[in-house]
């Protein structure tokens, strides 16, 4: 059974608040005391380490590789299938889970949104995945997975932890007083960096200047018939709609 770090955090936060109250009562101008500042910075480092452990513990379900989807079209490949999950309720699971508390946001991938020219189920011979459609599939899978990662981030209470951490950094004189890394909010830079890892996405460097219009065009997973699947998501009219998959 995994240890849920969140169980001890309320007591840790209360202990920090009590310590601050004691310091304010017994040490005049305690915020100008070098020993107090060192102590607060140590507390800040400890709290940030727990925050990072929990955040890094949110893991994403990976998408199937192109070859795995090819194998799903081959009856001789065996019973394992990405198209038909073991639950029998649709496509395989995707989303994110926090490994310590097991808090998760997962869904079944729609059977009609795999990158095949027709919706034949796994194990039935059919045309292999189209490479262009597969790239679009990876982009759609990435955005939906990131969305669920951010939902888990919010659900386990990390925004409140981040706010407290920033306040603690400010008190201890840590500069800059901020929390870096992914969080529950969308960042255009973050999306561009993740898209750059997908070959053929149109972004080769996640640090390059990028526009909202360019990102929206890349996130556009709509493929008109006859190349697209029979049931196809409509074109996105805004970046907000594209990220809300």
Image (cartoon, rainbow, N blue to C red):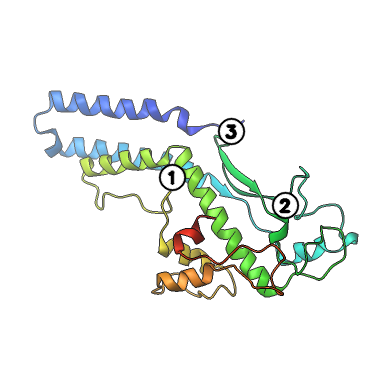
* Residue 244 position in % (x across, y down): 50, 55
Residue identified by numbered label 3: 2
Mark 1 or mark 2, which is nearer the start of the sequence? 1
User: Comparing marks 2 and 1, which lies closer to the viewer?
Assistant: 2
Image quarter of the C terminus: bottom right
Q: Give the Cα separation between the discs numbered 1 and 3.
A: 16 Å
The reply to whether callout 2 and callout 1 are in contact (CB within 8 Å) is: no
Q: Element at badge 2?
A: loop
Q: Position of residue 187 (x, y in %)?
A: 41, 59
The label shown at residue 52 is 1
Gap in angstroms between the C-alphas marked 2 and 1: 32 Å
Q: Residues within 10 Å of mark 3 (few under 14, many from 20)?
A: few
Quadrant position of residue 11: top left
- The residue indicated by pointer 2 is 91
Residue 99 in sight from this viewpoint: no
Q: Quadrant of residue 198?
A: bottom right
Q: Residue at x 72, y 74 (%)?
A: 226
Identity of the residue drawn at 52% across and 65% down: 236
Q: Is residue 171 above or below residue 211?
A: above
- Residue 12 or 206: which is nearer the viewer? 206
User: Number of numbered discs present?
Assistant: 3
Q: Is residue 52 left or right of residue 100?
A: left
Is any part of residue 5 visible from this angle?
A: yes
**Left or right: 147 as drawn, with respect to 186:** right
Q: Earlier in the sequence, mark 2 or mark 3?
A: 3
Q: Residue at x 43, y 48 (%)?
A: 184
């Amino acid at each position: 059974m995994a240890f849920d770090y969140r169980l001890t955090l309320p007591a840790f936060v209360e202990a920090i608040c009590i310590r601050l109250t004691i310091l304010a009562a017994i040490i005049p101008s305690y915020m100008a005391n070098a020993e107090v500042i060192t102590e607060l910075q140590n507390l800040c480092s400890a709290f940030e380490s727990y925050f990072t452990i929990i955040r890094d513990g949110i893991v994403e379900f990976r998408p199937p590789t192109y070859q795995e989807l090819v194998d799903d079209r081959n009856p001789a490949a065996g019973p394992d299938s990405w198209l038909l999950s073991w639950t029998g309720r649709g496509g395989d699971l995707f989303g994110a889970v926090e490994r310590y508390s097991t808090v998760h946001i997962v869904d079944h991938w729609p059977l009609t949104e795999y990158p095949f020219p027709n919706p034949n189920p796994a194990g039935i011979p059919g045309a292999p995945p189209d490479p262009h459609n597969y790239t679009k599939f990876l982009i759609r899978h990435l955005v939906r997975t990131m969305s669920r990662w951010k939902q888990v981030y919010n659900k386990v209470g990390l925004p409140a932890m981040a706010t407290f951490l920033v306040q603690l950094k400010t008190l201890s004189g840590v500069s800059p007083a901020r929390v870096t890394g992914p969080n529950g909010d969308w960042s255009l830079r973050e999306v561009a960096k993740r898209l750059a890892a997908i070959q053929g996405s149109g972004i080769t460097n996640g640090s390059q200047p990028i526009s909202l219009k360019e990102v929206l065009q890349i996130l556009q997973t709509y493929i008109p018939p006859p190349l697209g699947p029979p049931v196809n998501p409509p074109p996105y009219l805004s970046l907000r709609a594209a990220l809300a998959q």
